[in-house]
Image (cartoon, rainbow, N blue to C red):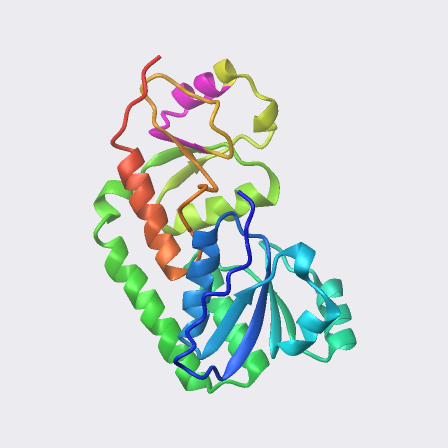
């Protein structure tokens, strides 16, 4: 899905800070969830697609936030030197990453530390309360994870936070595996759900969940709850050949 510029800002409230939101997003739900997070801190974030990023765009904001799973220190230093604005690479995937990202943004903008921590604790408490609704249905699930490399590592880390047992065989590149190989691995490891980046893997009796989802956001505190809910719902399904 091609992302369009998100400029749905609340004009009734004068923002304390303006942020450019750049980087890797899978759908507009992800963009909106991050904008909502930052709005709690008085930061109005406008999504800037890559083809619309210009020097004037970088300079008009108080901070440029590039969302991606892994930090690029060299890019960060280059942008900060060139545009004299803070430039952060952050990840909002998972509650720990989200909390860290918000703290880094608050520090870069000089926001009140107590206010930042108050909002972070509020978000983490919300996660705890929401997860209690799905904990018994998600905890201990054995999930075959078909993601490779750092993406697989990140997803596995977040699934661990949910109390899920991730099954990965790092000897294989899953995009090159045949369906019968995936089926054999799932059966051997007694997987209860398969999570992967593509749709064309179906094992009789096992539900399959795609990540990233083309419509659902798994970013931020609310995204963690969405992930638990999706796993809970998908685990109840059964696909048959």
| Residue 140 in sight from this viewpoint | no
In percent of the image, x 50 and y 30: which residue is there? 198
Q: Against 130, is 20 above or below?
A: below
Depth check: 58 or 134 in front?
58
Q: How many marks?
A: 0
Q: Against 73, is 165 above or below?
A: above
**240 part of magenta stretch:** no
Image side of residue 171 versus residue 96, left or right: right
The image quarter containing residue 40 is: bottom left
In percent of the image, x 48 and y 58: which residue is there? 31
Q: Position of residue 47 (x, y in %)?
A: 55, 62
Image quadrant occupied by the C terminus: top left
Image side of residue 89 versus residue 129, left or right: right
Depth check: 189 or 26 in front?
26
Depth check: 43 or 232 in front?
43
Depth check: 184 or 82 in front?
82
Q: Position of residue 45 (x, y in %)?
A: 51, 70
Q: Position of residue 107 (x, y in %)?
A: 55, 80
| Residue 69 in sight from this viewpoint | yes
Image side of residue 66 versus residue 217, left or right: right
**189 part of magenta stretch:** yes
In percent of the image, x 53 and y 30: which residue is there? 169
The image quarter containing residue 120 is: bottom left
Image side of residue 104 versus residue 223, left or right: right
Over which residues does the magenta segment extend?
A: 182-195
In percent of the image, x 22 and y 45: which residue is there? 136
Q: Position of residue 179 (x, y in %)?
A: 50, 17
């Amino acid at each position: 899905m091609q992302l369009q510029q998100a400029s749905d800002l609340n004009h009734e409230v004068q923002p304390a800070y303006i942020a450019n939101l750049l980087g890797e997003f899978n759908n507009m739900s992800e963009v909106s969830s991050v904008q909502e997070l930052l709005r709690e801190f008085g930061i109005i974030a406008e999504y800037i697609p890559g083809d619309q990023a210009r020097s004037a765009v970088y300079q008009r904001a108080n901070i440029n936030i590039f969302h991606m799973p892994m930090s690029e220190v060299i890019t960060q230093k280059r942008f900060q030197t060139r545009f004299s604005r803070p430039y952060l690479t952050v990840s909002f995937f998972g509650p720990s990453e989200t909390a860290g990202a918000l703290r880094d943004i608050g520090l870069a903008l000089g926001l009140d530390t107590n206010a930042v921590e108050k909002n972070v604790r509020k978000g983490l408490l919300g996660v705890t309360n929401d997860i209690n609704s799905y904990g018994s249905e998600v905890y201990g699930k054995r999930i075959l994870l078909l993601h490779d490399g750092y993406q697989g590592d990140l997803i596995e880390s977040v699934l661990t936070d949910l109390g899920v047992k991730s099954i990965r065989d790092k000897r294989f590149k899953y995009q090159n595996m045949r369906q019968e190989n995936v089926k054999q691995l799932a059966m051997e490891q007694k997987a209860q759900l398969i999570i992967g980046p593509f749709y064309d893997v179906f094992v009789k009796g096992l539900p399959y969940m795609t990540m990233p989802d083309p419509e659902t956001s798994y970013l931020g505190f609310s995204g963690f709850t969405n992930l638990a809910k999706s796993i809970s719902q998908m685990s109840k399904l059964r696909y048959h050949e």
